[in-house]
Amino acid sequence: MNATIRETRDLKTCFALRHSVFVEEQNVPIEEEQDELDLTATHLLAEQNGAPVGTARIVFQDDVAKIGRVCVLKDARGTGLGAELIKAAVRIANTSAGVSKARLGAQLRARAFYERLGFTAFGPVYMDAGIEHQDMERTLP
């Protein structure tokens, strides 16, 4: 993987990436893809050769950093970029005062991916935007 990941305020690009993956590929209803949390979240943007290829967001709530809206364009999948996005989000969470846990809602088909990154599943399986999910958490050092 030859990509850079950085914090960004370029929501237009992040939303375009998310639209491509979630709305167009996964049929997530467009009205569910963006929400009010986007306004206060920390957004990450991954670029390869200057082109946007992935994004994620972190929402801070009390002692929890909730990682979400993680997506990588089709052409960049299988390169390790998704793992690098999660690691970058965890690093940011780990350096945020008062945050002791990173949490996410994983699509069931991606649960093993997150387990390899140190997350543990908990609670019931639930539907989110028509896709089965399960919450996962990782304690921060």
Image: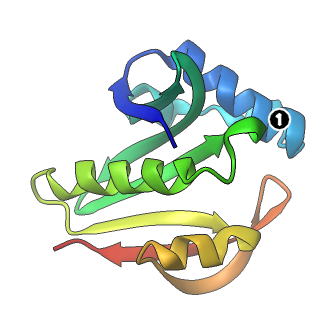
> In the displayed structure, would residue 94 be above or below residue 118?
above
Tell whether 14 sits left or right of 97: right
* Pick the front one: 32 or 51: 51
> In the displayed structure, would residue 67 be above or below residue 16?
below
> In the displayed structure, would residue 19 be above or below residue 127?
above
Secondary structure, mark 1, is helix
Q: Which residue is at the far left?
A: 97
Tell whether 59 sits left or right of 26: left
Query: Within the image, what quadrant is residue 8 found in?
Result: top left
Q: Residue at x 51, y 15 (%)?
A: 50
Residue 102 percent location from the top left of the image: 35, 65
Q: Which residue is mark 1?
A: 23
Colouring mode (rainbow / by chain / secondary structure / one colour): rainbow
- Residue type marked 1: Val
Residue 99 percent location from the top left of the image: 19, 61
Q: Residue at x 52, y 31 (%)?
A: 36
* Pick the front one: 82 or 93: 82
Residue 76 percent location from the top left of the image: 67, 40
Query: Within the image, what quadrant is residue 17 found in?
Result: top right
Neighbor class of circle 1 (other Cα within 10 Å; few <14, some 14-19, many 20+) is some
Tell whether 78 sits left or right of 59: right
Q: Residue at x 41, y 77 (%)?
A: 118
Residue 52 seen anywhere in this rendered image of the structure: yes
Q: The C terminus is located in which quarter?
A: bottom left
* Pick the front one: 96 or 39: 96
Residue 139 percent location from the top left of the image: 28, 77
